Image (cartoon, rainbow, N blue to C red):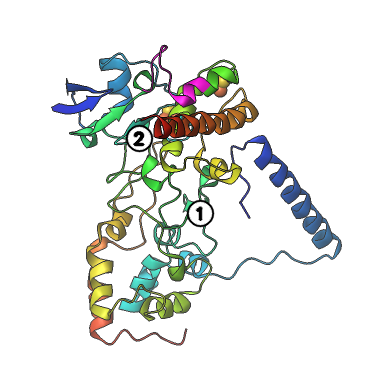
Amino acid sequence: MRVPRVHQTPIQMKRTISLIGLSLGIFIVSVFANEPTQKAEGIQMDTKQQKVEELKTPFDKVMAVLTHQRCINCHPSDNVPKQGEDSHPHHFGMLRGKDDHGFVAMKCNTCHQDENNKYAGVPGAPHWALAPASMAWEGMSRIEVAQALLDEEHNGGRSHEELIHHLTEDPLVLWAWEPGVNNEGEEREKPPIAKDEFIKAVKEWFETGAVIPEK
Amino acid sequence: MKISFNINGKAQTVEVPDGDMPLLWVVRDILNLTGTKFGCGKAACGACTLHIDGDAIRSCSYAVKFAEGKNITTIEGLGTPENPHPVQQAWIEKVVPQCGYCQPGFMMATAALLNKISDPTDEDIDNNILNICRCATYTRMRKAIHRAAEIANSTNSAQQLNP
Ligand code: FES
Ligand code: FES
């Protein structure tokens, strides 16, 4: 199913109207049932509440970065890339497509190039794409993200050494510290710790066995 | 800084103050090819769509330095009044434009789609044509996209029969 689009053709609009009807129905039912609205449990909220000075161990530091929206926005669990500090669905109904690069004639590279574009506010880095669906992290706790990261079924078959390389040298990962400006010309938020500190924490965590704490 | 590329079949070298300057500005303001439009400047509307090496690109978010050595096609290079591209022919037949501002971008996006999918379904159109038309000519546009595919495919099969 396509997500509601910001800009829609008439056909897409009909789909959205039914979605709005459905959501309104659910809203009315929940109001009458007097149920408090449940917020999704997720590490994104946990880490935001966690102060930087509370990030004590290498694991805390690594996961505070990996669960930041600069990373999670491109590790979606619903094939919809996310944008912005509020992780809204990518405008215009952009989706993963077959190869994680969008569609044949509307690809990520139709708009995203190898560098940020300061005039348009469009972010860019080499091999701009979504992480494969097997690497979906959105909505997971930090423990679950760490488990997925180390699981070869969910990390693209990467060994610990390859993971260290990916996390500390891949320009698309390191783009998180140079995210540029958005389409309003405002600086995008960076992960909660500095790049050097993250790289150091990744190496320390793997050197000490990549142990995942119980919580 | 100097940047060289081919545009609509001609070699061009431009002198720009900043390699990050959007290609759209170069095309419109330096090369005076004003068929490509400035809509939003934020890669949101598609009015600035042109082709680079056959792929649709939103030129407002494309730094001119990346165009070095590439082949660029703008709406001016798609076809001619005597020999229109199937997309231009279909657009004329279906009388698609209203104000017309968004249309070059849609036509370039459609031509790029037909390069990849010769007979696109409605779903292919939904996925690949994400431009915006403020006059909402979407219904005529969809008909014209199907018609353009028909023209292109009949021309191709006629060429195969009479090479
Ligand atoms: S002007 Fe480039 S997408 Fe709107
Ligand atoms: S015809 Fe007017 S914006 Fe599309």
Q: Residue at x 35, y 24 (%)?
A: B74
Quick one: A100 or A190, which is closer to the camera?
Answer: A100
* Res. B24 image quadrant: top left
B48 vs B124, left or right, is left
Residue A173 at x, y percent in the picture? 30, 60
Is residue B20 something one can see in this rendering? no
Query: Type of residue at label 2?
Result: Ser
Q: Chain of mark 1?
A: A
> In what quadrant does ligand 2 lie?
top right
Quadrant in which the C terminus of chain B appears: top left
Residue range (magenta) = B78-89
In the shown orientation, is residue A52 left or right of residue B150? Answer: left
**Above-or-below relation of A23 to A44:** above
Taking the spot 60% from the left edge, 42% from the top edge, the residue there is: B122
For disc 1, the marked residue is: A87
Amino acid of disc 1: Ser
Instruction: Count residues near mark 1 (Cα–Cα under 10 Å), then give few for <14, some for 14-19, many for 20+.
Output: some
Q: Is label 2 within 8 A of ligand 1 (CB to nearest ligand atom)?
A: yes
Residue A210 is left or right of residue A16, and the answer is: left
Q: Residue furthest front?
A: B162
Which of the two residues, A53 or B102, is positioned nearer the viewer here? B102
Determine whether the residue tagged by mark 1 lies in a helix, strand or loop: loop
Percent x, y of residue B121: 57, 43
| Residue marked by disc 2 | B61
